[in-house]
Image (cartoon, helix red, strand yellow):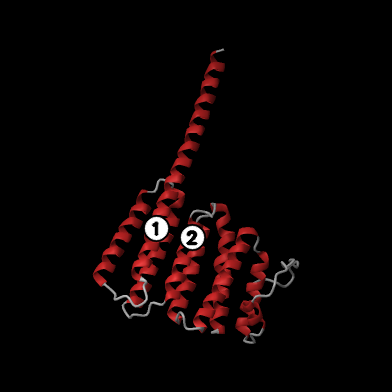
Amino acid sequence: MPSGGKKKRKKPSRKKSDIDSALDQIGDESVAAATAEFQDLVSEAKGDTTELIRQNAEEIERRLDLLKKREIDKEDFDHFLENQKRDLRVFIDAQPAQAQERAEKLTLHILETAAKVAIALI
Amino acid sequence: MNSTLVSRNAFLCAAAILIASCGTATFTKSGSDATIESLRSFHLAFIDEFAVPGKKFNATAFNAKVNEGNAKFQEAIANDKFTARRPVFVDLKAQFDADAAHIKSKASRGKVTPALASEMKKDVNKTYDHALGR
């Protein structure tokens, strides 16, 4: 994800979630890069997309919690991650054609990155 | 005089076509919305019937319901008049296929939990809301 030489975007102020705190503690380089990319993409999102990303982050957190409590297993967790991708595909396909590319970048890409981070946390 | 009359008639025809097409588009979209709601009800009922903790898996009943679902989704994809929605119907069918496969895998091994069923239904509702642009 490009960052050097670009003008700085103002990041939206928001309360740190559990997943954010967990992300801060990750030392592995590839995950750290994914984390930086995730945070960069989130800062680009606006309006409905922001709400969608927030909703997806909450779902990942809730399901990580269910997984820890053994109320669901890893197969279920993976199924729900794939469901989120399918849901985002529905969200994108329901957008007007001219908005689809941007929506795709901001949603599917963010989810893939978030999933990578979440899996590293398990 | 004659050309003014022709121009006026052409304008009125164009306006009538525009008004009629707007009405048709609205009607078509509301019909498409109703189809999505009908598929949502079927999908949720499917989860309620087969993602039940402790319930013995009935393969015959399960396959019959999956076939019924496949027919409903295929019909929606083929017949929806609001063509811009067609990719969304294809996406919803993919969601149904994935849920059916997961339920089959879990229920046949007696591994359905209350949280699994509950989370699956949350996902279904969210996805169908997005399909409707909500």
Q: CA distance from mark 2 to mark 1?
A: 18 Å
Amino acid, disc 1: Ser
Seen from the viewer's position, the closer of residues A35 and A57 is A57
Q: Secondary structure at mark 2?
A: helix
Residue B99 quadrant: bottom left
Seen from the viewer's position, the closer of residues A59 and B81 is A59
Residue A100 quadrant: bottom right
User: Who's the residue at 45% across and 75% down the image?
Assistant: B115
User: Who's the residue at 70% across and 69% down the image?
Assistant: A14
Residue B58 quadrant: bottom left
Answer with left or right where residue A77 lies relative to residue B76. right
Q: Are marks 2 and 1 in contact (CB under 8 Å)?
A: no
Answer with left or right where residue A49 lies relative to residue B63. right
Mark 2 or mark 1, whichever is nearer to me: 1
Answer with left or right where residue A97 lies relative to residue B40. right
User: Who's the residue at 45% across and 56% down the image?
Assistant: B88
Q: Residue tagged by mark 2?
A: A90
Image quadrant occupied by the N terminus of chain A: bottom right
Q: Residue B121 at what x, y percent from top left?
A: 44, 66
User: Who's the residue at 52% across and 19% down the image?
Assistant: B6
Q: Residue tagged by mark 1?
A: B41
Q: Residue B71 at what x, y percent from top left?
A: 30, 57
Disc number placed over residue B74 in the picture, else none: none
For this orientation, the residue located farthest to the left is: B60
Amino acid, disc 2: Val
The residue carrying pointer 1 sits among few (fewer than 14), some (14 to 19) or many (20 or more) residues within 10 Å by Cα, namely: few
